[in-house]
Amino acid sequence: KAGVTQTPRYLIKTRGQQVTLSCSPISGHRSVSWYQQTPGQGLQFLFEYFSETQRNKGNFPGRFSGRQFSNSRSEMNVSTLELGDSALYLCASSFRGGIGRAGANVLTFGAGSRLTVL
Amino acid sequence: AQKVTQAQTEISVVEKEDVTLDCVYETRDTTYYLFWYKQPPSGELVFLIRRNSFDEQNEISGRYSWNFQKSTSSFNFTITASQVVDSAVYFCALSEFTGGFKTIFGAGTRLFVKA
């Protein structure tokens, strides 16, 4: 079973540019969550998508956006990049079931996309 | 509001020592999940264990054990006879059902196991 695939793995951008990151979840997983990981702030929740709908959003400015496609693949976009956006962006997929369901809500993470903003 | 606190930033032990990683959580929900994840130096986060709020049974899996106590809102993780390969950052996480699926993580505890 293929894992969660994130592309690109590394990228360098300059301030003011925008970036799009892609995430392909595990087959059968319909929930995709995005996180930003930095040494100072740890793992910060960005948003979660399920069946093409954003169900939850973290405390990030509107420059951070995302979407999910009908095949559950997801993208996140950061516009007008700032130096502070340099981070590891992690995508995680999950089979989202009810309480007690085996594997429900367990996040399987991708390797991440490391963004450097110069 | 959800909150996960891992008060220990870094722990250093010598191989074969036992080590306990602490996790305290806050939630207003009666239905929730708790997790532990491991992030080795290679970087990829790996799931270790999940507990739901109705299951306070503690668990032992090999050298790992977990102690879930709702009365103190704690979900602690113990590694017995630690090994160098246990060196990693360990994250405690909380997932609630209210308002959609959202899992938040503690700040993580970096464990160094020295040979």
Image (cartoon, coloured by chain):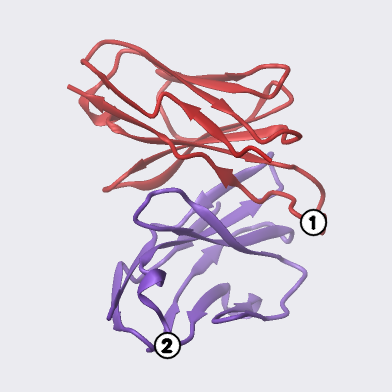
Q: Tell me the quarter of the picture where residue A118 sits.
A: top left
Q: Residues within 10 Å of mark 2 (few under 14, many from 20)?
A: some
Q: Amino acid at mark 2?
A: Asp
Q: Nearer the viewer, residue B66 or B47?
A: B47
State left or right for residue B8 relative to residue B2. left
> Which residue is denoted by mark 2 in the rendering?
B18
Q: Which chain is painted in red? A: A
Question: Marks 1/2: CA distance?
Answer: 30 Å
Label ID, residue A102: 1
- Disc 1 is placed on an element classified as loop
Which of B15/A79 is in front?
Answer: B15
Q: Which image quadrant for residue A57?
A: top right
Is residue A96 shown above or below B77? above
The chain containing the residue under callout 1 comes to A
Q: Are marks 1 and 2 on the same chain?
A: no
- Which color is chain B depicted in? purple
Residue A47, x across and y down, in percent: 54, 32
Q: Tell me which residue sits at (70%, 21%) in the image.
A: A52
Estimate the x, y position of residue A4 in percent, counting from the top left: 58, 36
Residue B45 versus residue A78 in the image, above or below? below
Residue type beneath disc 1 = Ala
Chain ID of residue with mark 2: B
Q: Classify 10 Å Cα crowding around label 1: few (below 14), some (14-19), many (20 and above).
A: few
Please give the name of the residue rendered at 25% of the width and 11% of the height, measured from the top-left corner. A16
Q: Residue at x 75, y 42 (%)?
A: A96
User: Residue A57, labelled with which disc?
Assistant: none
Above/below status of A71 relative to B54 = above
A38 with respect to B56 (left or right): left
Residue A82 position in % (x across, y down): 24, 22
The one nearer the camera, A13 or A51, is A13
Residue found at the far left of this picture: A118
Q: State the image coordinates of residue B46 (x, y, percent, origin top left).
A: 53, 55
